[in-house]
Amino acid sequence: MQAEAGPGAASFPESFPQQRLSRRMLRNETLLVLGLSLGASGVSALISFVGSVTKPGGLKDQAATLNASAAPGRPWLDLAWQLFGIATALVPVALVAHFLLRERESLRTLGFDRTRPWPDLGRGAAIAAVIGSTGIAFYLAARGLGFNLTVVPEALPEVWWKYPVLVMSAIQNAVLEEVIVVGYLLRRLGQLGWTPGTALVASSVLRGSYHLYQGIGGFIGNVVMGVVFVYLYRRWGRVGPLVVAHSLLDIGAFVGYALLAGKVGWLPTA
């Protein structure tokens, strides 16, 4: 769904060529973007999941670690690797912006801009509050039933940059996923003639697929989250609130784990 362009919308000179894109070009472009980003992550997560379920022992006795140290014992080198990983993960978003520019559009077309900061923040915070509470309960239940690995949201050393990196990592995840899996993918699938229902299923299953490394619970929970996010995007025409919500959810998970792990009995640790 396309959001209305506001007064500050990107402008293009009249001489800027607007290409008429064939279905084949749109299809190939979409596959390339996904192949460089979350589609590849989905395949990687599937391979990881197969490895977990074929490994002796239950899923809950295995751990999926996020935000791990890239250079143990070398904090400055570790920081360089962390920042490099965050920056390069956002390159597919820049690629999407480039492809939209070719259509005389911009990321504002997807509702990713600063024209409505307070509504985006308010809606995002409300979404995070609802999904966050139910998500924790679902994760604990899925792990207890043996459907999920123990998720370790962070395993960084106790250095000064730990919490800033966790926050940046959370925001990077949110921007990458919501811009590509919701805004960009729904736009392209609509241009390819997919029905709204089929596009919703594709977006939601893709979101679930790259969380399969967490187990069946991670897949199901994120498929449900995907359905909710697609519905809200179509209602509001903006990925902005979804980026805010996702950022808050991941910040809560990453920073919350760093502060609470080993200090409360209900939070599983590896």
Image (tube, rainbow, N blue to C red):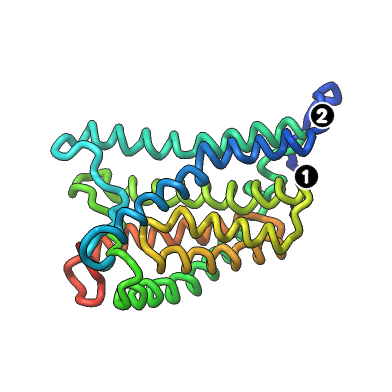
Question: Which residue is at a point 62% across and 53% down the rendered structure image?
Answer: 182
Q: Residue furthest toward the right?
A: 14
Question: Which residue is at a point 45% across and 47% down the rendered structure image?
Answer: 43
Is 83 in front, or is 229?
A: 229
Disc nearer the start of the sequence (2/1): 1
> If the image is split into quadrants, where does the C terminus sit?
bottom left
Dot label at residue 7: 1
Is 89 in front, or is 63?
A: 63
> If the image is split into quadrants, where does the N terminus sit?
bottom right
Q: Separation of disc 2 and disc 1 at Cα?
A: 21 Å
- Location of residue 219 (image quadrant): bottom left
Please identify, in this view, whether the residue under mark 2 or under mark 1 is nearer the observer: 2
10 Å neighbourhood of mark 1: few (<14), some, or many (≥20)? Answer: few
Look at label 2 and name its amino acid: Gln
- Element type where label 1 sits in the image: loop
Location of residue 6 in the rendering, given as x and y in whole percent from the top left corner: 76, 47
Location of residue 9 in the rendering, given as x and y in whole percent from the top left corner: 74, 41
Dot label at residue 219: none
Location of residue 210 in the rendering, given as x and y in whole percent from the top left corner: 46, 53
- Location of residue 198 (image quadrant): bottom right
Question: Which residue is at a point 40% across and 68% down the rendered structure image?
Answer: 217
Is 40 in front, or is 177?
A: 40
Q: Which residue is mark 2?
A: 18
